[in-house]
Each structure stands twice: as structure tokens, then as C-alpha cells.
Amino acid sequence: MAQGKLTTGFRNRIRDWALRRQGADALPLTLAARRIYILPTRAGWTFAMLIVVMFIAGMNYDNGLALLFTFWLTGFALVAMVQTQRNLAGTQLLSAGAAPAFAGDHVAIAIVVSTRGAAADLRLSCEDAAPSESVPASGSADDMPQLHIEVRRRGHWHAPPLRLTSTAPFGLFRTWTWLTLDISTLVYPRLAGNLAIPESPGVDGGAANMVNNQDELAWLRDFRDGDSPRQVAWKAYARGAPLLVREYRGYAMASRDFDFSALRDPDVEARLSQLARWCVDAAARGEHWTLRLPDSPPLTGAGPEHLEQCLQKLALHGMRGSAAA
Amino acid sequence: MNRSVKPVPTNIMLASFASGVLLHIDRAPPWCLGVALAALIWHWLYSRGRLRPAATALRVIVTLALLAGIAATFRTFNGLSAGTAFLLVMGAAKLLETRTQRDVAVVATVSLVLVLAACLDRQSLLRLPLYLASGWTALATIAAIGGARTSTSAVRAFGAAGGALLLALPLAALCFVLVPRMQGALWSMPASERGQTGLADEMSPGSISELSVSEDIAFRARFEGAAPPVAQRYWRGPVLHDFDGYTWRRQAGTGATQQQPVPTSAPLRYHVLLEPTGRVYLFGIDSIASIQGRRNFRTFDGQILAALPVTETLAYDGVSYLQTRFDGALSTTGRRLDTQLPSGRNLRSIALARELRARATSDRQYSMMVLDYFRAAGFEYTLTPPLLDQDSVDDLIFNTRRGFCGHFASAYATLMRAAGVPARVVTGYLGGAWNPIGGYYAVRQSQAHAWTEIWIDGEGWVRVDPTAVVAPERVQQGGSELLARSGSALNSLFGDAGWLRDLRDSWDAANNWWQERIVKFNRSAQLDLLRRLGLEHIDYLGMALLLAGGAVLWGLMLWAVSMRGPRGTTPDALGRTWNRFLALLASRGIGIAAHEGPRAIAARAVARLPAAAADIGSFASRYEQLRFGTAEQSESAIRAMRAQLRRIARATTANRR
């Protein structure tokens, strides 16, 4: 939307007023009429002009049919207004979530909504963020408007005020509501750094062990929480079998050591980025590693949960509240 | 915004413009229709990738050329025909550059205006379905681009537009009745220049019988009180004075002083709905005292002429007197005008007239003798009279002896004039068939008639209908029954079937209702309706209040209707957990299709998010068991699922890269 600075400022002031008026939102939330705004779109203004012109023509020709047509279109436009407004009014926001992301990437926000009758045609946007991609989910049982917002700095991230918009069904009106949902997530350090991954002291490279493991399938057993996904028999599951896990004989560990103090880059952020990169790489290889950061005990382990813990530590390094998990 | 990446709904847009063009296919200049058709075909091929997009320069040149074409064809952009042609070519030009949603909206708008132009142009009930279909398609086009969805199916678009139209109908009716109408136009429009059927300015032998095969409605009439008998229902129209021996014509100048009839009976009041004639004649029961509803004036010979040609259906009220007398004498100019005959023509008839007049004692007796002569001469009344030569009256009386009303009126007037009795030919309609469904008399072109008026000193102008002595049944029954025997195509096919007449009556009544109540719903009709609704003294404020109240009621109705419909039920704890799972997947870029079950969703999610595969699979299995299986929904089960959800969230974050 190309808008002048003046209008943008004006719009922001209206938005801030509206946000103050409605306060913070807690889920699940049913959108009430008093917080829903509606204005004609450009197409709507054109349609209004059309109706005026038609009315004048019908009056001038004293033509009942033309006037009937005009009045019908007027009613149509009003129906369109109500129907557009009903896309939001009474709609329930059930849950909202955002996935953690790496700095420089996009945080994906999704809201699960439950609408009246046919799936509403909703779009999520954010005026503060840079022009962002917003993807209306189409045809889903519960519509899930999504929004990707670019994030630049690591640490805690809170979603800015969002705008939930709809122009359906005729595009003559745009209805919207501002949302201040408590959506927060962590932004991990930017994945960067090209230093070679440190070798693990005293243990052979893990890759060879992994290959051995793959060779010796022992049996299949029922799935238990905490099992590695790599061992689940997915082909069997897709065919309709219950979740089964492949058991292998023998499992050797490789362990690497990622130490903050061992890095020489004077820039703390660059060091964190390098550590994040290594953690991600090690996890991708299914390896075992230890992350050492100053002022906190070393984290040793493997797998996604370990990676998650490491990235959280890296995201919050040197920030207040870093002790929180 | 990413509006432009949405695909353009080509088919529905083309259908919308094509249907708009279709409404004007018989009226618009052929080259405009050609341009519109070419643009439709071009865009269709373009949308299928067969053609490259038109260059901007080309589009500009084409657009300017089309504008020049309009200017050259019409010499104006004002008026309905020029405006319609303008819309056609501009819509066509827009099709050359339809790439964005906004272009589609422009084409849909043009289509809507084309419907409006069609409404202004022609309002027959028969065309109404066309207008509806066209308008609906245009609004469906708007619906197809209305939302944020990447594509809207045609069925869905038509459904949305149709539903909204139905909901809008009550408000449309309310506004139609209550929005105050103006008297007269804001600015004048160029009159349309179209030939209509109906009585012409002149009458030659056979011209009325040509008319009489037409079953078109000339006008409809409703009487206040009892209608006069059919033999009295002479609807007076053009009065003809100039005779060249073959053709009767109107008198161009005024020539004679007015002879005003003095009423000697009670006034007869009636309401007429006149179909467009393209001429100025207003018809009324003989003799017409006054007509109200359209600016008109009265000529010296008692015709009522509208100030402007009747190019649209016209409603007016008439007052007539069945019996009148004339005081005073005919002026010299008037006598000269209505006794002159072309020299050297119809000589045998003139000789006959002189012979008969010599035997009569008075003009009055002479006129009766000529009628007797007509009765005795064995004339035959026929719809298909033989062609007459230049001395048409001689040919009729002494030769063919077969004719239609116009022939006998012409012959009678000639015989009168030859004897010095002032006579003129009056054309109009006789009769009118009662339509029991509509409660009015339908006067058709087949009931066109011609008779004479002669001046008798002391009595004034007297109507004499020679057809009444030749074919009394014509005057007694009206035209259409006679026609049945003469055999029109329709009647010979079905016979005089009762159901056919009922069908025709019903259709005609519907048409009449449509014309009178919808198309011609003007200020006076509005006031009349409000009066009959008991709102006799309502003023503008009252109408506005009534309108506002009705609109509020309609709004409430609309609100109630839109509240209805399957409300998404509030999900239980399990449902909420599942929704969170879906939200999580959505935030990871995995959309869910409506038809997908938990297992299919899980399989897809696993493929995209292998890091969390185990938890996703187990989560989906649990959901399935709890929701559809026999497992008991317990808090601990939900808690376990939530824990899984958290693990999925964690596991899938690190692996987004």
C-alpha cells in the first residue's frame, strides 16, 4: 500500500488510540463488534460512485427499472458491508503461536481461528514490520492466517500489534481489528561463522560409528516417548501400522567441545553466531557435544532437546533473565 | 501488497463483459460490437498463453482510435446510444490490459453500467431475465476477486453474489417505493430515433390492414366506472384531410378555426398506458376533452398531440364525452379544407355522388343514402384486399368491392366531399379486449380502425363509420375475433384455444403490471400507491422516516440472517490442543487442507519436519485414539499431549535451517 507519511502517521495514531481503548488480548478471544473497524476499499468507493451515477441517470430518465437496479445495488453494497464485518465479528481466536527463529530469518506467527460457518477469508498483517509476507490459509477447516516477520536481534521477541483483516466476499469493504496478543518467542543468534568444527578430544569421528549402527537392525518394538525419530519405521506408519521403532545393536558416541572462551573474535555476537552454527551442525549429524559459556555450567548432550537448550542459552547470553529456561 | 500475484478470474470476467455486450447486440453500431467481440477473443487466447500481452503503445493507439471512432459515429459522447457504444469500446480496450485485480474490477463495473444502459434503453418484461443474468455475472466477477484467497471458484462467486442479491432485494423494494421521485428530467436527453409500429401520418389503401395482422399492444386502458360498449369505444387518433385520390394525409397547417364540441353527456374518465409510437398522437375515446400526464395540445380538428414524440411507454389520464354537440357554423376555410378533392380523379365516384345528392333533400339524408348504397352494393370486408389503382375509390366501388375499414372510410369521405359535404377521415382504434387478469382493456394494433366525420349544418361534426354497415360484426365485436376467422398464423395453429387466450392474457397482464408499476413508477404513481396504502398526506420528512425505519428493520433482518449458520463450536480441551498443534504446524509453513485427517496431516508434517517425527506421529495417534477411538479423554492424556507439543516445537525450531 503506497501511503504518504502523513496518512501513515495519522493511521498509527488512530491505531494506538484503538489499542489503548481495547487493552491487551488474552486467548481464547471472541472478537466483539466494538473493536472491529470497517471502511470501503478503493473498489468500494468506485462502487459507491457508480451507484450515485446510476441514481442520477435513473432519476433523470424517470426510469423505474434503472432506479430499481440502482437500489438493488445499494442493498447489495450494504449486504457486502455486513457480510465483510461478520468475517471478524464473533470470530474466535483460539490460539496463536510463533516459532523461534534465528536472527536474520523470519518469525512465523500463526493464529488459529474458528469462524462462523464457511471459512472466513482472513489476512494477518503488521504495520510496524517491514513489508511482510502474509499467507491466508485457504480451504482449511480452521483458517490459520499466518505472518512472517523478519527479526534482526537475538533474545526475547514479542509480537508487535497485529492487524487481522478481511475483504471477503466482495472486496468492497475492508474490515480489520488490531490485536495485541501475547505472542513471544526466542530469537537465536544469527547462524554465521565459518570456522571448522572443533574435533572431539580422544574419540574417533562419530560418522563411522553411525554407519555401523545403521547396518545392524535388531528388531522393531512399540514406540515410547523420547524415542529418536530416526528410528521410527515411518513407511510402516504411513501404511497404517502403529508407530514402531527400529532397535539397533550398539551405539557409540562422538563428543565435541564448543567453548565460548576458546574463540578469538572480539565481537561477542560473532562468537555466539559461530557457536550456534556449530551446535546446529553437530545436531544435524546426530553428534554429541558440550557447549561452554562463561557464567553458566557446561551443557553436554545430543539431540534436538539439547540443541534447543544450547540455542536458548546462546540467545539469552548476557541478557537479563538468562537464567530462565 | 501481493494482490497482483493472484490469478485473474478470466472466464467469469469474460462472461460478465460478454453478457453486457449481448444486451446491446441489436442496437449498438456493428463496429463497436466487432471490437468488443475481438477483445473478448483476444483476451481469451491471451489468458491461455497463446498470445503475448499487448504493448502499452499499441493499447494507447487502439484506445485513441476507438474514441475517434465513437466521435465519428455519433458526433457526441452524450446520450444513451453514444454512451453505450463508448462503454463497449472502453471495456474492450480494458480487456487488452487486464492483468491485475483492479482491471478486473473495472471490467465488472463497465458490465454493470452496460446493464444500466440497457435498463434505460428498453424495459420489456421479456428482457428482465437477461438483465438479471448479466448483473449477477458482473457481481460474481467482483466476488471472484473479493477476498484474500488465492482463487475463488465460479460456483462460490455466483453463490456469494446471488445470496447477497437476495438479501438486498427487500431494501431495494423499500427504496423503490419510498425514495421520492422528481417531476421531470434534470436535463434533456436526445430523443431516440426509432421507428415504432402504429398508426402513421397518412393512410393509403391497405396501410391499416397491414397493421391489423400485428398482435402488438397499442395501449392498455382502464375505465373509471363502467366501460362504454365496444361499439362506442372509438379511440380517436390522427385526423386526415388531404386526399390525392389514393392517399389521405394530415393537414400540415392549422387552416381552420377550432370547432369545440360541447359535452352533452356525463364525462368518461380513463387511464391509458400507451406503448411507444415514436409519434405525437395521444389516443382517447371520442371525443376527447382533455388528457393529462404529458404536455400536449389540441389541434383544430380535435386531435391531442403530445409536445414530444412518445418514445417510451407513456401513462396518461383522459377525460372524454361520448355525446357532444357543436354550436355555430363551420368556417369557410374549414369547409374548403374538408370538401376539396383532387381534380380529375375518381370521376365515376364523383358522378355517383352527384346523382345520389340530387335525389336527397338534405346533407343528412344524403349521408344515410350513401350508407344504404354501401350496404346494398355487396361490399366485402376483408383483411387481404386486392391492390387498388390510382383512382382508388372508383376501383373499390365499381371494381373490386372488397376492402378494409380504411377503404370504406376513404370512399365514404370522397362521396361526401363530392357532394359538398365536409368530410374527414379519422384513424384510431376500435374496441379493445378485456383482460380479466389485469383488469384492463388491451387495445392491439390489429384493432386499428378508420372512420369518417362529416359536418352537418346544425349538428356539427358527426361520426359515420361506413365499416359498420359493410361489416357490422367488426364494430360489434372488435378486431381480434374477426382476425381469428381471417386466420392469423397463431390462431390457425392452435384454433381459438381458450388456454392460449388465457396464457396471452396472463402474459399481457404481467407485462402491464410491470410497465405500470415498475417501469412507469413516477412521482404520480408513487403518490397514488402511498395514498392507497393509507398514507395520503405523507410529506418528504414522513417518507424519509418511513424509509429509515424500514431500512433499520431490514438491517436487523440482515443481522439475524448473517448470525445464522453453522457456528464453529467451541472446541474442548482436546480440540484446543489439536488446534495448537495445527497452529504450530502453520507457523512452520505447513498448511492444512480441509479434507485432511489427523493421520494425513501427521504424515505430511513428518515429511517436512523429520526432527520431530516421532512426537508428531505419536501426537497424531493419540489424538486419533482420544477423538475417534475408545480411549478415555483424561487430563493426564491431554497433559501428555501438551508435553509432546512442546517437544515438537523445540525440535522443529533448530532444524528450520
Image (cartoon, rainbow, N blue to C red):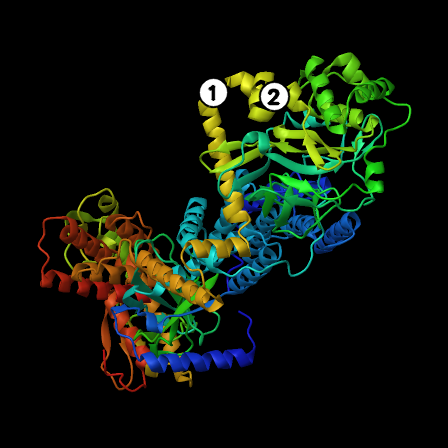
**Residue annotated with mark 1:** B497
The residue singled out by tag 2 in the image is B472
Q: Kindly identify the residue that appears in the image at 52 percent across and 41 percent down.
A: B222
Q: A92 or B440, which lies in front?
A: B440
Q: Chain of mark 2?
A: B
Q: Amino acid at mark 2?
A: Pro
Picture coordinates of residue A34 (x, y %)? 34, 73
Pinpoint residue B87: horizontal percent, then vertical percent. 65, 51
User: Element type at marker 2?
Assistant: helix
Residue B145, image x and y in percent? 49, 54
Q: Which mark is residue B623?
A: none
> In the visual, does B287 lie left or right of A116?
right
**Within the image, what quadrant is residue B530 found in?**
bottom left
Q: Where B608 falls versus A258 (above or below)?
A: above
Q: Could you tell me which residue is drawn at 29 percent across and 56 percent down?
A: B610
Which label's residue is closer to the chain start, 2 or 1?
Answer: 2
**Labels 2, 1: front one:** 2
Q: Residue furthest front?
A: B361
User: Could you tell me which chain the residue with mark 1 belongs to?
Assistant: B
Name which residue lies at 33% across and 83% down: A261
Q: Amino acid at mark 1?
A: Ala
Q: CA distance from mark 2 to mark 1?
A: 25 Å
Instruction: Judge if badges 2 and 1 mark residues of a common chain.
Output: yes
